[in-house]
Amino acid sequence: MDDLEELRKIRRRVSASGEVTHLTGDADGDKVYIRTVKAELPSRFSMFKNIFNAMGIAVKTKFRSVGKKEQKRRHSICKNECQWYRAEDDRCSKCGCFTAFKTRLEAWHCPEGKW
Ligand code: SF4
């Protein structure tokens, strides 16, 4: 198993516990230390700005949905492959959005370019 897969396993385990969502690591020689850090949401002002912009784009594209399969794929990337994901409330700590909702519309994209 490669290091990335090992990190994903650790992340899933920690996320499932609902305590922490953000992992970070330090390398010291050949040892890697993994710390868990509480992922904070952006400021209220930033979240309001994000929602306002996202709704504007959604209106322009007439709220077109990506379909269930694509929504599942996107949501799975959030949950399993992203350090910004907050398992305790199913939110993205990068933009503050609820990921189950954000992954549904064609107009909305991951702020980190992951989907
Ligand atoms: S939207 Fe992007 S940055 Fe946010 S949790 Fe999902 S994959 Fe991560």
Image: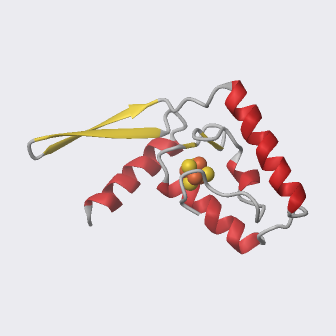
Quadrant where the C terminus sits is bottom right
Q: Write down the quadrant of residue 31 in the picture.
A: top left
Q: Is residue 45 above or below residue 103?
A: above
* Residue that appears at 49% across and 51% down: 82
Where 62 sits versus 112, above or below? Answer: below
Quarter of the image with the N terminus is: bottom left
The image shows a total of numbered marks equal to 0
Say left or right for 22 vs 72: left
Q: Relative to 12, is 63 on the left or the right?
A: right
User: Where does the image place residue 112, in percent across and percent down from the top left?
Assistant: 53, 52
User: Residue 87's x, y, as percent?
Assistant: 58, 42
Q: How is the image coloured?
A: secondary structure
Q: Nearer the viewer, residue 81 or 95?
A: 95
Name the residue located 31 percent from the left edge and 57 percent from the top edge: 6
Q: Residue furthest left?
A: 29
The residue drawn where x is 73% and y is 53% is 102
**In-image side of 36 versus 28 (left or right):** right
Instruction: Name the foreground residue: 12 vs 35.
Output: 35
Quarter assignment of residue 97: top right
Extreme top residue here? 44
Image height check: is 41 above or below 27? above
On screen, residue 56 versus residue 15, left or right, reads right
Quadrant of residue 57 in the image? bottom right
Residue 17's spot in the image, x, y percent?
51, 39
Q: Position of residue 19 (x, y in %)?
A: 51, 33
